Amino acid sequence: MDKQQPHWSDILKRRLAKSQKDERSDEEMKAEETELFTKYYTEWKGGGDRDKSYKNIPRFYYRLPAEDEVLLQKLREESRAVFLQRKSRELLDNEELQNLWFLLDKHQVPPVSGEEAMISYEAYLQVGEKAGPKCKKFFTARVYAKLLHSDPYGRISIMQFFNYVMRKVWLHQTRIGLSLYDVAGQGHLRESDLENYILELIPTLPQLDGLEKSFYSFYVCTAVRKFFFFLDPLRTGKIKIQDILACSFLDDLLELRDEELSKESQESNWFSAPSALRVYGQYLNLDKDHNGMLSKEELSRYGTATLTSVFLDRVFQECLTYDGEMDYKTYLDFVLALENRKEPAAIQYIFKLLDMENRGYLNVFSLNYFFRAIQEQMKLHGQEPVSFQDVKDEIFDMVKPKDPFRITLQDLVNSCQGDTVTSILIDLNGFWTYENREVLVANDNDSSNTADLDDT
């Protein structure tokens, strides 16, 4: 049986007993005591190896160079540029994509499904071996399983697979392109970064060929605001590149490369020239005194001119203004909110205006405060005002909040009725549309029936 090791306290006592005969100063002896105590206490706790464990942790934080560290900043920029160039060279170019399509077509497996050429898993692996190292990541069992649907022979569509590869290549190309504008190198773009990206993108979009250069700055502002309104709800002033790639806005913007884009598509696309000119033209028409800014009175003529004065007061209280007037950028946020009332970001924008006391919820007092302005507008138009009690009950029935006396932002979003509720409270035209919804639906049905009779 092994002899039991002496306790650390006994060892320390013996050392202290010996030290009494020493002729050292008190400070030296205290220093030795502290050193010995720390050593033996650490061994007793079993932390000898633990103190060195930090050496096994890889470094994960790298301080960004300060503004005055010019050389370090330049080194970082150059290294990022080299890294992005290397990543770009790893992507398939046009010639390699054409070669991939040729190989896929050559290895198709009959019979044809409808009009689509198909390929089996065995042939798929053969193509993967011949396509080269850049294509290796696309020829996996997981990718094949994703594209496998209802083919009785267990094959996948060649066209679907090729489109998948094209989409992946495009995403990586776009990510690299956006990263070149990421000055901070932190995976996000500031407003000025995105403005530079879109400004340099304009000449590559045939649908914007007709834009005058004097309008470029207004176009860029119009385009950038949509990204920041929906992707930066906390107003941090920056957007993750990952979020830009995940949303559909970039697809809409790059859709303008199509020289034969239909008129309907242009009108529904926020980034098209007609859409940007429409929004800017509305702003100029509202600006009656031509000072480049909008007062509350000027903004009151927006749309059908039926927004309540109480709501407009809240807009000018909460939103950024200059000497009580609104600039174009603030106006764009206002337009995006009112034109996209079903979207959570738009509901959040309007909810903040309705939540006068910043409590995070709307109560009966809040609803009554805003609806009284609707009742006053109804009187001015010679209409019989509707009872608030009835409207209040309808709103709570629509939203079904967790708390029967309070409506939170999340309640509004979850109910999918946020656009209806906000329209009832801020816009006479929106309230009238809601009140007469049954009549309007009946008229639409009558119109469609009449059209059917005319066709026959």
Image (spheres, helix red, strand yellow):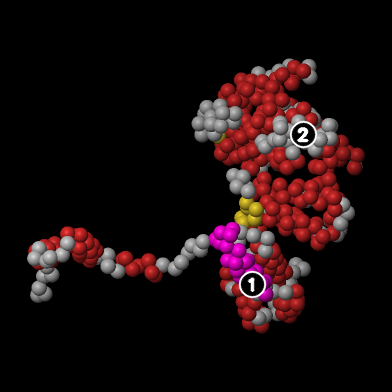
Quick one: label 2, few (<14), some, or many (20+) residues within 10 Å? many
User: What kind of secondary structure does the magenta stretch mostly adopt?
Assistant: helix
Most foreground residue, 34 or 25: 25
Q: Position of residue 317 (x, y in %)?
A: 65, 31
Instruction: Give the left or right position of residue 20, taking residue 240 as reference.
Output: left
Q: Quadrant of residue 422?
A: top right
Q: Amino acid at mark 2?
A: Leu
The x and y percentages for residue 106 are 73, 80
Task: Give the quadrant of the N terminus.
Answer: bottom left
Q: Position of residue 319 (x, y in %)?
A: 66, 36
**Stretch in magenta:** 64-89
| Secondary structure of the residue carrying numbered label 1 | helix
In magenta stretch: residue 134: no
Looking at the image, residue 395 sits to the left or right of residue 205; the answer is left
Question: Can residue 363 be spotted in the picture?
Answer: yes
Front position in the image: 291 or 283: 291
Q: Which residue is mark 1?
A: 82
Residue 364 image-quadrant placement: top right
